[in-house]
Image (cartoon, rainbow, N blue to C red):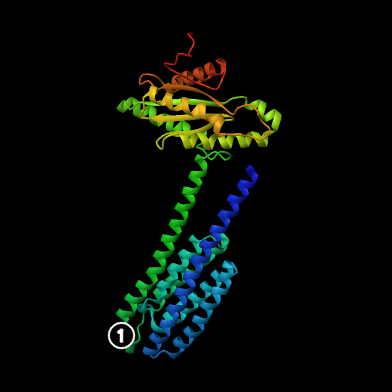
Amino acid sequence: MVKNDEMEFISIAQSAFNYKKQNLRIFNTISIIGAFTHFAFIFLFLHLEQPTLAWFNVFSVATWIITLWFNKHSRYNASSVIIFIAILTHTILATTTLSAASGFQYYLWPMTLLVVAVPTLPITLSATIASINIIVFGWLSICFEAKLPQLESHYLFLYITNLAMASIPFISVAVVSRYMYENQYLKMAKLAERDDLTQLFNRRFGLRMLQYYFNRLANHDKTFCIALVDVDNFKQINDTLGHSVGDEVLIKISNYLSSTLRDTDICSRWGGEEFLFIMPNVDIEMIEKRLETMCAEMPKQIHIPNWKLPISCSFGLIQAKREEALEDAFKRADRLLYQAKNNGRYQVVSDHSKNVSSD
């Protein structure tokens, strides 16, 4: 059996590995797109009779290819700085040479979003780079408006093309960042709803669903049943075989309970060796028979080495009433569970069970 701390370590390691893969995918995509874009710029600047810019883009392509090596070795900080310098230098050179009317300054925006949204650089450095980009963008847009007469017929094409090409990585980085955020949020939400040991829903989630079904019962008269389940002789198991075996028992019982319920039923770990069932849209007589079968079959399905007594549970089952509060319903279920324990354990006691003693 894998212990809690080992399970947590494996989960953290897996998350770190996935995060590393995500960063590699993002930066490799950026490096490849950057290399192809600057390769295309070589021919564009040759067509515009700008040999200096064409030769500069030959070096730019080599620079973008080099970042692939840094990405492969997870040196994303270095890769980010190289990309920043490459884009900033190219933007300044192209805009000061061809004027802001060519639209090359817009490539600063996806770089700004990248360094801020993708958490590879320290926040201070990210903010500094973003601020530099914004300042340079304003400087280029205001101070280099004069157009070259020989390129007058090309400016509209250049402006629209560069604006579109800069928008693609900008939108891509925004979409990927949102996906990563939502993915991490869903993972955290899932972890917040689950019990670490048994992987069943936890008490907080069980309470929330109880309130939901009570509200639905009050508003729509949708009946549901509640069962409190307690492991029999659990303290004796812990005291005799140790807490690690006790954890193994809880895991095996949890797997058995959750696999036996319907897909619409909710099974949560209520605390310690106690579990909560929420079973919507079912009559109590029907669910009582199901729980009795579950109870009877449990010792046949769960076996623990060096333990001769049967592994069993006691059940307190009720059908929620429209006019009662959640707390009152829960007290009824708890009282019936206590009754099942007093009757000798290993049984289901429900609202209409013959095993209920009169109060």
| 222 to the left or right of 241 | left
Q: Quadrant of the N terminus?
A: top right
Judged from this view, the residue extending furthest toward the front is: 300
Between 7 and 341, the residue placed more toward the observer is: 341
The mark tally for this picture is 1
At horizontal 43% and vertical 17% (from top left) the residue drawn is 351
Q: Is residue 37 above or below residue 272?
A: below
In the rendered image, is residue 131 in sight?
A: no
Q: How far from the left and from the top, in percent, is residue 286?
A: 38, 25
Q: How far from the left and from the top, in percent, is residue 122?
A: 58, 61
What residue type is disc 1 on? Glu
Say few, some or many: other residues with alpha carbon within 10 Å of mark 1 (under 14 / 14 to 19 / 20 or more): few
Q: Quadrant of residue 172?
A: bottom left
In the rendered image, is residue 282 in sight?
A: yes
| 190 to the left or right of 324 | right
Determine whether the residue tagged by mark 1 lies in a helix, strand or loop.
Answer: helix
Q: How far from the left and from the top, in percent, is residue 336?
A: 49, 18
Between 186 and 234, the residue placed more toward the observer is: 234
Q: Quadrant of residue 73?
A: bottom right
At horizontal 39% and vertical 64% (from top left) the residue drawn is 171
Q: Quadrant of residue 142?
A: bottom left
Between 5 and 303, the residue placed more toward the observer is: 303
At horizontal 59% and vertical 25% (from top left) the residue drawn is 232
Between 82 and 296, the residue placed more toward the observer is: 296
Residue wearing tag 1: 152
Q: Is residue 27 above or below residue 219?
A: below
Q: How far from the left and from the top, in percent, is residue 267?
A: 48, 34
